[in-house]
Image (cartoon, helix red, strand yellow):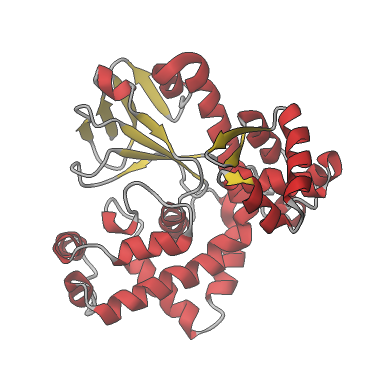
Amino acid sequence: MRLRIHFTRDDLLRIRLADAPDPMWEIVNSLHLLQSGGGGLVFDRWRRGSARRLDGGEATRRAWRMLVLLAPCASYFPDFLTPAGGHRELDAAVDSVLSTPADRLGREMGRLASGGRPQPWFAALARGDAAVMGVLGEALRTYHRGAIEPHRSAIQAAVRADIAARTRALLYGGGEALLDSLSPLMRWSTPVLEMDYPVDRDLYLDGRGLRLVPSFFCWRHPVSYADPGLPPTVVYPVGPAPGWTDPDAQGGASGGLAALVGPTRAWILELVAERPATTTDLARAAGVSPATVSKHAAVLRGAGLICSHSEGRHVLHTATAVGMTLLAQR
């Protein structure tokens, strides 16, 4: 089975790359991994740890049961669980899920129920019942705390490294070079991007462009929306290395990076890798003066790890591809 994505010339100019892990895609993809047992060498230790945390009380068990039924390891799960456009922060992502219009909830829950294992609460969720939607929101947050949040550093490092590689390909070769860089997961042969997929399908972009989302918990083959009318999106695996759950592999600014550039500079680099930030923002987050941040930023900028530009009265700092790569090697 293959997914074939058909590009026009305009689509090649409208390729977009997610700049951070998407919490909802990580939730759904990790749910599939927990159910399938795939990638044993890489994910079995994570499964065992997550299972212990998710079995720690009635609330976590209830969250786990609800989400497994909503996102079964099958060829279909409702698209509303992974909002188009993506979000960096869990709360914003959950709010987006919970604000799904009732007519869309009805369509997608109806399709899920037709595939088997309908639950009594499916109908209430399909209507957008406030109480059931509230339970869903809490289930997503509870599951994220147990299965995703403990590994936040490893997830961000792997996704940052992939983003840096794709950004270099785009910078030096354009859209086609970026698509070529996705091999062997996908094969680019102008004007079609082709990949293994659970069902046989053609997707015509028709000038809408394509959003690419690297995902830590995506496994084996890329994922896309079931509804061809949604903004075209491909979520693809970034492949963590075996041993990533070891405590030494979870390091943050207190590890080797801090020894190399100093703890405050390491912390600043981590902050601007997550999102662009002003000097004032960084000073507040790092607990130092704006003047101190400016001095550290100058050193990081001189090393090619960040770039800075004026935006009105503020100076905005962002991590460069080199800085992202360094963070990924921690």
| Residue drawn at (39%, 17%) of the image | 176
Residue 128 % position (x, y): 21, 72
Residue 234 % position (x, y): 36, 38
Q: Is residue 322 above or below residue 37?
A: above
Q: Quadrant of the C terminus?
A: top right
| Residue drawn at (73%, 38%) of the image | 297
**Quarter-wise, where is residue 145 in the image?**
bottom right
| Residue drawn at (81%, 46%) of the image | 258
Who is closer to the viewer here, 201 or 169? 169
241 left or right, relative to 204: right
Residue 233 % position (x, y): 33, 39
Who is closer to the viewer here, 100 or 66? 100
Most distant residue in the right direction: 259
4 left or right, relative to 245: left
- Number of labels in the image equals 0
265 left or right, relative to 95: right
Most distant residue in the bottom direction: 58
